[in-house]
Amino acid sequence: MEKVHGDGPERLTLGTKVGFGVGDIFGGGAMVVIGFFYLYFLTDVLLISPALAGIVFLVSKAWDAVSDPIMGVITDRTRTRFGRRRPYFLAGVVLVFLAFFFLWFPVGFSKEIFRFIYVMVAYVFYSTVYTLVMVPYSAMASELTLDYDERTSLTTIRIFFSSVSSLVCAVVPFEIVKGVGDERTGFIIMAVVFGLFFGLPYIWTFLATKERPEFQSEPKPFSVKESFVDPFRLPTFIPVVLMYLFAMSAMDIIMSVMVYFMTYFIVRPDETNYVLGVLLIVQILALPVYERISNRHGKRYAYITAAVSWLAFMILSFAITPGAPNWIIYVFAALVGSATGGMVIMIYAILPDIPDVDELYSGQRREGVYSGLATFLRKLSSAFGIFLVSNVIALAGYRKPVEQTVDGVTRLVKQAQTPEFLLVLRFVFAILPVVFLILCLLAASRYRLTRDVHERLKALLKRRRSGEPLETTEPEADAIKLLLRPEKGGVS
């Protein structure tokens, strides 16, 4: 992991960036498979009611609320010859495969309550494995480089692999399921293929990344307040939390409702994965555009640009009707993809800067704490989106498929939906994302860590680590803290 040190920018080698980037094949792809297809798998394959399916996601978040922050503390305090983060990548090679397989195994229990219990256990196990791997992985981004723009470059490559994985996972899983014929068998085969696809790259991530020896000092005694309360007092953290949570919620709502929208509203279910594929291809193409915008104008500016663009593009959703030309849904998907690409890359480029602000206030390097909280929020947004959609469609009168046996072959047959259900479906698809995007913009208006402020912060932290006396560093520290306070509006 060669770098340019001194006063110049800190550069990572391409090998390090790529090795780190492939680690998000799991983080990006698995979320897409679950977001696009898992609610459908539960309601239309396992025949679990939408309300119970929503409970699976909601209840599992109670465990995530505990496990994700605790894993952040554990990885910060881990001390091995491989470092604080890398041992968990090796563990993930096998555990990721097993967890993903169990998640999609179509158990044959005759009673719905037993199928519900199995799904609950499988999802909690999957969520735990996700935490075990992704919390240390996300924490590494802050440590690999301390440079403001180099973190954006690192994030661009990470999100490239994440987006390519998302594209593959939007198109291929359903093709595997459809190609087999029997959906239950198809989901088993899909789980094996993608379990390997997600688990194996962590071998490369383990080998390609190294950790900073200066961050390996013995941690302070554990404190619940310092680990789980003080982060929310950090002036930069709350705006970023809201920017992250609202952006991901908007995307997760689009993801989870798309299959129902394509199947029941415009009645083109076989095109669902192609529409999602267009969205994700354009999302990948948008990454270098927003990297350039960020390098020129800053990360917040690029994030706001993407959010405003998405808001404008949502107007086109009202032109999508069952009788509309086929191309409209693809144009809409492309436009949304161009905006989501910007929001994804910017929020993940912003997150690694937060531990620097924390070091300003606490004097500690606690990347894991913030990674744990961010990982929990990512899973919370996904679960919240699916829970919201599942309960809305349940209240709207969703009719789940019924089993019919013809010539000795039992198949699931979809039922026609009511006009009331279709109206609600259109509302969820077109209006709910707009609400969350407006909230994104409000949160972004309070984020104050610009490139210039970060450069001052990085220089100050370097002086502190070198042992410079407090009486010479604290005036600058106080000045930076003042600039970071949203209510002061000290930074444009």
Image (spheres, rainbow, N blue to C red):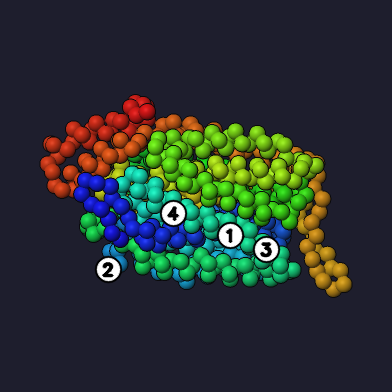
Instruction: Assess whether mark 3 and mark 2 are in contact (beta carbons under 8 angstroms).
Output: no
In the rendered structure, find residue 175 and report the number of the disc placed on it: 3
Left or right relative to 329: residue 29: left
Q: Amino acid at mark 3?
A: Glu
The CA distance from mark 3 to mark 4 is 27 Å
Badge 2 marks a residue whose secondary structure is loop
Residue at the spot x=20%, y=49% of the render? 6
Q: Position of residue 47 (x, y in %)?
A: 72, 60
**Disc 4 from disc 2: Cα separation:** 27 Å
- Quadrant, the C terminus: top left
Name the N-terminal-most of marks 3 and 4: 4
Closer to the chain start, of discs 2 and 3, is: 2
Cα separation between marks 4 and 1: 17 Å
Residue 168, image quadrant = bottom right
**Going from the N terminus, do you reach mark 4 or mark 1 first?**
4
User: Which disc number belongs to residue 81?
Assistant: 2
User: Looking at this rendering, what residue extends furthest in the bottom direction?
Assistant: 408
Q: CA distance from mark 3 to mark 1?
A: 10 Å
Q: Position of residue 103 (x, y in %)?
A: 58, 64
Q: Position of residue 196 (x, y in %)?
A: 53, 70
- The residue identified by callout 1 is 168
Q: Secondary structure at mark 4?
A: helix
Identify the mark nearer the N-term, 1 or 2.
Answer: 2
How many residues crowd mark 4 within 10 Å: few (<14), some (14–19), many (20+)? many
Q: Residue at x 18, y 32 (%)?
A: 475
Amino acid type assigned to the residue bearing label 2 in the image: Arg
Pointers 4 and 1 in contact (C-beta within 8 Å): no
**Three-letter amino acid code at disc 4?**
Ile
- Say if 41 sits above or below 465 in the image: below
Residue 166, compared with residue 410, is above or below; it is: above
Decide if residue 249 is in sight here.
no
Instruction: Sort mark 2 into few (<14), some (14-19) or many (20+) by Cα contacts within 10 Å.
Output: few
